[in-house]
Image: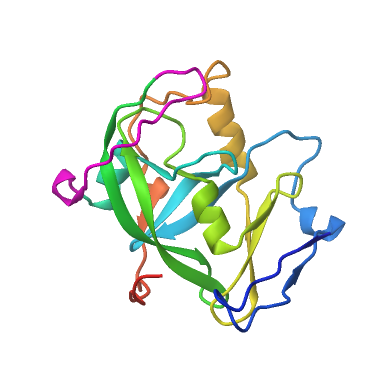
Amino acid sequence: MCALVQTSVHRPKLMNLRITLTKEDARNVYFPHHDHLVIDTQITNKRVSRVLVDNGSFANLLFKLTFTAIGLTEVELDSCLAQIYDFNGDSLLQMGKIQLPITLGNDAQNTFKYYTFVVVDCPIAYNVIFGHPALVDFGVVTSIRHLYLKFPCDNDGLGTIWGDQKNAQKCSQVSSRSIFMVREEPLEEEDVAPISQPQPARGMV
């Protein structure tokens, strides 16, 4: 069992929110598995699939194909001085950084923040990597065994996003030799889909 305590500075109404992990939470997970936690989530006004939740990544990464599919252009990028390396020690070609709105959850239970992504020109199986900074700021608790994440919502409730185990396995099968799994084919339409009623921006958080 994990307990998440919110300080009064960040969320006054969520000072003692308890998040529990039970066997029931894994009812839709196929065992045994060593799959990554891969989710769908809303970025700007698009629903984006193949989002890797990576507690060990120090940055949030948005890959070029996804950046373009969302409808963004390079003129919207700010310069970024940080150097990004993969697990093999190779430097990745970064295009810049951009701040985008992220909505975790569904219409009933969700939370919203603006967050900075480093845009990287690198073919990969994933569309986005949610790194440690965003997960901390959202107050996320993850369970790789249960393949889900839980988080406090803006309406004082508790939200849950279950991982897409099938997509996680597809990404892993692309290449077993590199942490950045090369994918050469273009994005499919269902990977980045429009949302009919995007949530209005609520300001900077």
Q: Is residue 31 left or right of residue 181?
A: right
What x and y, as percent, mark residue 53? 56, 45
Q: How many discs appear? A: 0
Q: Report if residue 63 lies within the magenta region.
A: no
Specify the principal SS of the magenta part: loop
Residue at the spot 55% in from the left edge and 54% down from the top edge: 135
What x and y, as percent, mark residue 154? 53, 77
What x and y, as percent, mark residue 137? 53, 61
Position above or below: 180 against 79: above
Position above or below: 182 against 165: above
Residue at the spot 61% in from the left edge and 81% down from the top edge: 156
What x and y, as percent, mark residue 38? 57, 45
Position above or below: 174 against 166: above
The quadrant of the picture occupied by the C terminus is: bottom left
Residue at the spot 34% in from the left edge and 61% down from the top edge: 44
Q: Report if residue 82 lies within the magenta region.
A: yes
Extreme front residue here?
A: 9
Extreme left residue here?
A: 75
The quadrant of the picture occupied by the N terminus is: bottom right
Q: In this view, does 183 lie to the left or right of 57?
A: left
Residue at the spot 30% in from the left edge and 31% down from the top edge: 121
Query: In front: 156, or 10?
Result: 10
Query: In front: 62, or 77?
Result: 77
Q: Kindly indicate the quadrant of the structure image that contains residue 161.
A: bottom right
Magenta-drawn segment:
73-90
